Image (cartoon, rainbow, N blue to C red):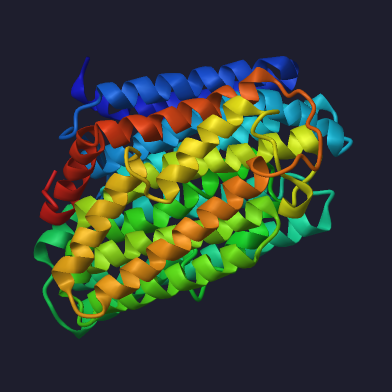
C-alpha cells in the first residue's frame, strides 16, 4: 500500500463512514447502527496497522506557505486508538440504548441515523486533529470538534436543559478557541511557518513565546474542563449517555490535554507555564473531587470526577512527565467510559438517576456490577488494575518533585477513592431500592469488556506503558516530519 494512503486510511475510513451512515441511514434507519459500528471497527483496525513514523504532506496554499500535513506519530496514534476504539464500543452500546432513549423522549427511529453520523463525525474531527502537523489545519479540526459536540450535547433539542448545555459548551470551547487562533497567528508571524514540527524546532524562550504558550494553554484547559473553566462539563450531562461516555471521557476532553502534549516543547520555553499547569491541575483535582462527593445524580458524579482526573494529567504535564500523562489519559478513558455506560444501563433498567433511589443491584445486575466494579477499582487505583499503574506513575512524578506536591497528590488520591466507592457502592451495595428490568445484552457487553481491559492492563502494564512511551517521545522530541 502506498505510504500516503496508509497514513490517511483511518481518517478516510472515518470520513467515508460518516457520509455512508448519514446517507444510507436517511433511506433506511436500521442501517445506521451496523454501518457505524463497522466504520469504527475498520478505523480502529487501520489505526492499529498504521506505522508511528508515517507522514504525508501536500501543498495547501503555496503562496502562504501552508501545507496539508498529517502524520501518525506515537502521540497521534494513541488518541486515534482511543477515538476509534472507545467509539466502537460506544456505538455498539448505542445500538441498544438509542431505541430506548428515543422511545422515552417521544421521538421516532428516523432520528437515529443523525446520532450515529454525529458520533462518527466527531471521530473524524478527533482523528484529523491529532494527525495535524499544520497549525491552521489543527485549528480547523479543533473547531469542528466544538461544533459537532454542540449538536451531540444538544441532541435532545426538545429539552430546554439540553439546548442550554449545548450552548454553554459551545460558547466556552469556541471562545477559548479564539486564544488558539491568536496564538497560531502570532507564531506564524514570529517564525514564518505554520508547520507544528518546525515551530517546535525553532521557537526560542522569550516574552512572545510565553504569551503564545499561555493562550494555547487557555484553549486546551477549557477544552479539558479544568478549573475555573470547568462548569460547562457537568451541565453537558444533559446529553444522552453514549455522548457522555465518548466525548466526556475519551474524546473531547482528551483533545485539550492532547494539545498541551503536542506543543509541550513550546510550553517548556514559557516563563512559569509549568508551575501554572501544576496550580490549575491541583485546583481541578480539588474542585472535581469535592464536588463529586456532593452530587447525587450518577452522571454528574462522573462529570466532576472527570474534571478531577484530568487535573491529574495536567499536573503530570506540569511535572514534565509527558509519557506518564499519556498513561493516565489511556487508562482513564477505559475506566470512565465503562462507568458512564454503567450509569446509562442502570438508569435504563431502573428508571432512576439518583444514588438515594438505587442500591443492592449486585445480585440483579451481576455482569454490570463486575465490569463496572473493575473500572471503579481502577479509578480508585486498587492493585491488579490499570488504575494502580496510572497512580504509580503519578506518585513517582510527585515524589521526584518533592515539597508539598506529594501531600497534594495523596489528598487527591483520597478524594478519588472516596467518590469511586460512593458511585459503585451506592448502586450495587446495600438493600434493593428499585427492581431493575432487563436491558439489551449489547448494553452490558461493552461495560464488561472495558472492565476486563482495566484488569488486563493492571496485570500487564507494559502494554499501556509502551503505547504511552511512544506518545511521550513524539511529544518531547518533536521530530520534523
State whether residue 248 is above or below residue 467.
below
- In-image side of 364 versus 336 (left or right): right
The number of callouts visible is: 0
Res. 183 visible in picture? no
x, y percent for residue 183: 33, 70
Left or right of residue 436: residue 442: left
Image quarter of residue 82: top left
The answer to which of 128 and 64 lies nearer the viewer is 128
Q: Quadrant of the C terminus?
A: top left
Residue in view at x 58 percent, y 60 percent: 233
Residue 92 placement (x, y as % from top left): 58, 24
Position above or below: 271 against 79: below
Q: Residue at x 42, y 64 (%)?
A: 414
Residue 80 shown left or right of residue 225 in the figure: left
Q: Residue at x 14, y 55 (%)?
A: 476
Residue 93 image-quadrant placement: top right
Above or below: residue 71 compared with residue 65: above
Left or right of 176, for residue 477: left
The extreme right residue here reads: 106
Query: Residue 151, position in %: x, y?
Result: 66, 47
Residue 307 seen in the current view: yes
Amino acid at each position: 500500500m502506498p505510504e500516503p494512503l496508509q497514513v490517511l486510511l483511518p481518517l478516510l475510513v472515518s470520513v467515508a463512514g460518516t457520509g455512508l451512515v448519514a446517507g444510507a441511514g436517511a433511506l433506511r434507519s436500521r442501517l445506521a447502527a451496523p454501518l457505524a459500528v463497522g466504520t469504527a471497527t475498520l478505523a480502529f483496525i487501520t489505526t492499529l496497522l498504521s506505522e508511528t513514523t508515517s507522514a504525508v504532506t501536500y501543498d495547501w496554499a503555496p503562496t502562504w506557505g501552508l501545507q496539508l500535513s498529517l502524520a501518525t506519530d506515537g502521540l497521534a496514534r494513541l488518541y486515534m486508538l482511543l477515538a476509534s476504539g472507545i467509539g466502537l464500543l460506544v456505538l455498539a452500546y448505542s445500538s441498544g440504548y438509542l431505541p430506548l432513549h428515543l422511545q422515552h423522549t417521544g421521538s421516532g427511529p428516523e432520528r437515529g441515523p443523525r446520532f450515529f453520523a454525529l458520533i462518527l463525525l466527531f471521530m473524524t474531527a478527533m482523528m484529523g486533529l491529532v494527525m495535524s502537523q499544520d497549525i491552521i489545519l489543527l485549528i480547523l479540526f479543533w473547531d469542528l470538534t466544538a461544533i459537532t459536540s454542540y449538536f451531540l450535547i444538544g441532541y435532545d433539542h426538545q429539552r430546554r436543559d439540553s439546548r442550554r448545555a449545548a450552548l454553554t459548551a459551545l460558547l466556552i470551547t469556541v471562545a477559548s478557541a479564539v486564544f488558539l487562533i491568536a496564538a497560531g497567528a502570532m507564531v506564524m508571524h514570529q517564525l514564518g511557518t505554520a508547520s507544528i514540527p518546525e515551530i517546535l524546532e525553532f521557537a526560542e524562550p522569550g516574552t512572545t513565546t510565553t504569551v503564545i504558550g499561555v493562550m494555547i494553554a487557555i484553549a486546551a484547559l477549557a477544552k479539558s474542563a479544568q478549573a475555573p473553566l470547568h462548569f460547562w462539563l457537568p451541565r453537558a450531562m444533559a446529553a444522552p449517555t453514549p455522548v457522555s461516555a465518548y466525548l466526556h471521557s475519551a474524546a473531547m476532553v482528551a483533545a485539550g490535554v492532547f494539545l498541551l502534549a503536542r506543543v509541550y516543547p513550546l510550553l517548556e520555553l514559557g516563563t512559569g507555564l509549568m508551575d501554572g499547569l501544576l496550580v490549575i491541575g491541583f485546583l481541578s483535582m480539588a474542585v472535581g473531587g469535592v464536588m463529586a462527593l456532593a452530587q447525587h445524580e450518577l452522571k454528574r458524579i462522573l462529570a466532576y470526577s472527570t474534571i478531577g482526573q484530568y487535573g491529574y494529567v495536567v499536573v503530570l504535564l506540569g511535572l514534565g512527565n509527558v509519557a506518564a500523562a499519556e498513561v493516565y489519559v489511556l487508562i482513564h478513558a477505559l475506566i470512565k467510559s465503562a462507568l458512564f455506560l454503567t450509569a446509562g444501563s442502570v438508569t435504563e433498567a431502573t428508571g432512576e438517576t439518583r444514588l438515594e433511589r438505587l442500591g443492592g443491584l449486585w445480585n440483579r445486575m451481576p455482569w454490570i456490577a463486575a465490569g463496572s466494579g473493575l473500572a471503579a477499582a481502577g479509578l480508585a487505583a486498587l492493585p491488579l488494575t490499570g488504575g494502580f499503574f496510572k497512580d504509580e506513575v503519578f506518585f513517582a512524578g510527585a515524589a521526584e518533585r518533592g515539597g508539598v506536591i506529594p501531600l497534594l497528590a495523596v489528598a487527591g488520591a483520597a478524594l478519588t477513592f472516596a467518590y469511586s466507592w460512593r458511585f459503585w457502592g451506592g448502586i450495587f451495595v446495600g438493600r434493593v431500592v428499585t427492581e431493575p428490568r432487563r436491558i439489551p445484552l449489547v448494553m452490558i457487553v461493552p461495560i464488561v469488556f472495558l472492565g476486563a481491559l482495566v484488569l488486563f492492563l493492571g496485570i500487564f502494564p507494559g502494554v499501556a506503558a509502551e503505547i504511552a512511551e511512544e506518545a511521550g517521545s513524539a511529544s518531547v522530541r518533536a521530530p520534523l516530519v
